[in-house]
Image (tube, coloured by chain):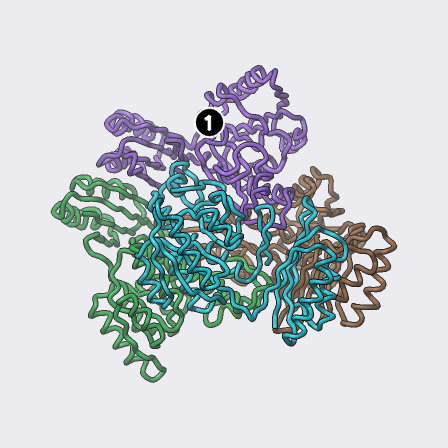
Chain colours: A green, B brown, C cyan, D purple
Amino acid sequence: MRLTVLISCEDKKGIIAITTNCVAENEGNIVYIDQHVDGQEKTFFMRIECVFSNEDSASRFHEQFELGPAKQFHMDYDIFSDRQKPIMALMVSKYDHCLYDLLGRYKSGEMDVEIPLILSNHKDLKPIADAFKIPFYHIPVTIENKEIAEKQQLDLLSAQKVDFIVLARYMQIVSNRFISNYENSIINIHHSFLPAFPGAKPYHSAYKRGVKIIGATSHYVTEVLDEGPIIEQDVVHVDHAHSIEDLIVKGRDLEKVVLARAVKKHLKRKILVYNNRTVVFK
Amino acid sequence: MRLTVLISCEDKKGIIAITTNCVAENEGNIVYIDQHVDGQEKTFFMRIECVFSNEDSASRFHEQFELGPAKQFHMDYDIFSDRQKPIMALMVSKYDHCLYDLLGRYKSGEMDVEIPLILSNHKDLKPIADAFKIPFYHIPVTIENKEIAEKQQLDLLSAQKVDFIVLARYMQIVSNRFISNYENSIINIHHSFLPAFPGAKPYHSAYKRGVKIIGATSHYVTEVLDEGPIIEQDVVHVDHAHSIEDLIVKGRDLEKVVLARAVKKHLKRKILVYNNRTVVFK
Amino acid sequence: MRLTVLISCEDKKGIIAITTNCVAENEGNIVYIDQHVDGQEKTFFMRIECVFSNEDSASRFHEQFELGPAKQFHMDYDIFSDRQKPIMALMVSKYDHCLYDLLGRYKSGEMDVEIPLILSNHKDLKPIADAFKIPFYHIPVTIENKEIAEKQQLDLLSAQKVDFIVLARYMQIVSNRFISNYENSIINIHHSFLPAFPGAKPYHSAYKRGVKIIGATSHYVTEVLDEGPIIEQDVVHVDHAHSIEDLIVKGRDLEKVVLARAVKKHLKRKILVYNNRTVVFK
Amino acid sequence: MRLTVLISCEDKKGIIAITTNCVAENEGNIVYIDQHVDGQEKTFFMRIECVFSNEDSASRFHEQFELGPAKQFHMDYDIFSDRQKPIMALMVSKYDHCLYDLLGRYKSGEMDVEIPLILSNHKDLKPIADAFKIPFYHIPVTIENKEIAEKQQLDLLSAQKVDFIVLARYMQIVSNRFISNYENSIINIHHSFLPAFPGAKPYHSAYKRGVKIIGATSHYVTEVLDEGPIIEQDVVHVDHAHSIEDLIVKGRDLEKVVLARAVKKHLKRKILVYNNRTVVFK
């Protein structure tokens, strides 16, 4: 049985020793350890994966860790077991490339996750959901019905015990009320290298500015549009000969890959958020 | 004798044929042709390199081209001869990495250019200029003396018949008056992927925003700070473990390469500017 | 009506002028021209796209070009019309990622092509073909039946007037007899940066050698395994922490993108082959 | 006082705990920990940086570590103190770009190292050594005098207590006798993405093969030419329009950066070698 422990706390001496000891005392074996110290903020971050021979020793570790190191160092921490598969929901609109890509990876076993539902404000992508045999809920969203629509969405998500949500080119702004239910658990893909070109139509802006690279950024959704903690970014070179349409086509390949990388890192519990930034362990 | 012809005009039928014909009729051989059409703006751009067996046929071509195609299609055009080496001035402050890099390339024969002078508002880099045997002029710039200082700079540049200026991490904003003397002929290196993080301390802003890539941008200097036409951009991946100091060190390698690429493209007459964007021929 | 003309011949004076003239005389408008000279081989390559107002002027151009420039300069040339959509066949085995990717792009209109059939030596990917409504032919291939199997394949391809074939991770070596029917028209994706790691299991070899980058290469298939003319290559960084399985997963994303780029360039008639190398126009 | 500990041993339970404990008991603070397990080889690798308040506690740790964890787990290990600056020698021939680059970085404080000497089989680069005020020894190497020349080189290196050697485009093959004195301590830069194009003239081979990327590889020198453990690799895209000369110029920028990155990682004690592969900690 494998536990993944994510820790953050004030940086002090001895945190690593006391924590690794606690694993060893319960006959756990650390198969991965990575840590980071933010020198300016004097904050310590650590990610440990440890294997226990049985559930008993794992839960004994959990208990001792809570009462020992976690208490002593006032840690914020999360412990995840490989016995519990994360549950992911997808929200989409009309663009299909990210949806195809994520479902293809899911199907080929690249992502260890359950996908109990896809939500959309349009019907267009239902055939894809059908082809992959995933329930698809069409909930139109307008200015008038937004509150009710989000209530419906939240009910569906909650009924399926969804852990995190991926906005796979979902073309609606989600409300703060919605976000507050899934703090650091809504992953968005924005089609520019943020902070350049936030908001609508970034490829048009990129064309107009005459940039020689375009990018994509995946980030957690927060109350401020396109300003959440960045998980992953990548770019591709372009030149004067690329029309806006060319940028859109080139950008699609980026969006797919950057979103998939972010989702996989989230799935593997590799990400810690603080000060609107991410620590992404290797 | 080799001529490089840069053309822009309204997009119409027959421009390529009439131009290439004009070369052929004067016994020139086209060794390179590249063209671009901006469909939205209905503007045509072309770059031709052609070899003439002697100066006579070259100047006959020049004349016929001016009276023929250029006139007929109301072209903006420039004709450069390989007999005239471009003259480049460098302006620097205290950072030495771009200066070392450019002079190293110059020394190793990578750039076919003359460098008659280096201007600086600080004395720090004089030893490098000395080592490379290039005259170095120290002209301090303050808020008070800026107008006079720029006058001195312009006099020196003009005395050396400088064609274009490279700001190799020159840490002063040049005035509009200065710029107007060298339109699309002052190349700057900015240490971010513009339009993200314009202005001062981009690495600090990048760190704060928690981006996963940092970049560098070379562009022509215009009246609006860091908003001139972009020539070249590149980026490098970073992560949470990089301190601001790390970003600065990583960024240096980018700045050097991105600036050098831009300078080499300018030198080879590969760049056309329009609408605050560049066409950069291959 | 748009024609794309691909030309190669001995490098001589006046080729561009006579060719562009021939377009102009038939009231064609050149919307794209790119050329390349191999100085060592003294060979000239050119790609022109020109728009004619009607079919008559286009075919007049075709005729005049054939009798004029093409004859005079002993050109090898091809002329493609946008009225004739290229016809592509896919050959696959068990891996689905490249197939998903190509069909997704096809579906979203990214590739202007017809796909009348998918051939496979295994049944596994039939459901994908079905989902995209493309006829799927299962032709098992063994050492014993290879000749007969290829005969069947060739019959199906020929019946559909297939222009070119994409081996989307097709895990069989095709015979010289097969190749000779589709010279420079079979595109393969090899999962390494050739010429490193040709042949089977390149990710295993890459792991063993401890490389810090892995790559993918798309190339035309020739008689010598993995030594055909390279169309496109790309790489991704890896490190010691990547297991062979990790390399395979990372590599998949590369394979998809590199193959798709090659197919799109082939479709747009951007590739000329000579001396086992490619000229890939922009 | 900061110690860097590099460990490798058979993978077993409790190694991290016992080691981190040993640090904590001597009032050290771990500021960095990274580990890797090669699952196939069942080998454990770890790198720890720890800060001790004084030399006494540091040497107490050293002693206890040796008698405790190191003995118990049969570790191979190295402990480096930040009080001892590494000593690096450069060996060059006629190419100057890597030399300029490394000395520029050294000068600007990017590398915490001493450079007591530069060895060369040619006189050409002496002026650069002079400009940077580093002793330059010209030792010509021929087939006849190779043994004697290497003896002279080794004497000079040994007199300066050189820790490691960087072959900055040194165009001679060093003998096994020479290598045996500096196991995993001679860093070479090869101008291709190994294992493609080993040996002489890789840019010529790359051109001939028509590759679309060229690369550079830094590696430790072993008895088999260009087959030592790879430290760092990178590539850049090229196309048909690049002549061999263009590849050489483009490659130079890669060689500089790839070599500099390898040297910096070696300097920071980030590299462990096993089975002709490297573990390069972050």
Residue under the point 49% across and 19% down: D177
| Front residue of C3 and A128 | C3
Residue under the point 62% across and 58% down: B231
In this rendering, is residue D186 above or below B262?
Answer: above
| Front residue of C204 and A55 | C204
Q: Quadrant of residue C26?
A: bottom right
Please indicate, yes or no, whether residue D255 appears anywhere in the rendered image: yes
Q: Residue furthest left?
A: A56
Measured as percent of width and height from the top left, residue D103 is found at 58, 36
Please indicate, yes or no, whether residue B207 appears anywhere in the rendered image: no
Going by the image, does D159 lie left or right of B73? left
Measured as percent of width and height from the top left, residue B72 is found at 79, 72
| Front residue of A201 and B243 | A201
Mark 1, Cα crowd under 10 Å, few <14 / some 14-19 / many 20+, is: many
Residue under the point 16% across and 40% down: A27
Going by the image, does D148 lie left or right of B140? left
Going by the image, does A67 lie left or right of D79? left
Callout 1: SS: loop
In the rendered image, the quadrant that contains the C terminus of chain B is: bottom right
Measured as percent of width and height from the top left, residue B208 is found at 44, 57
Q: Quadrant of residue B22?
A: bottom right
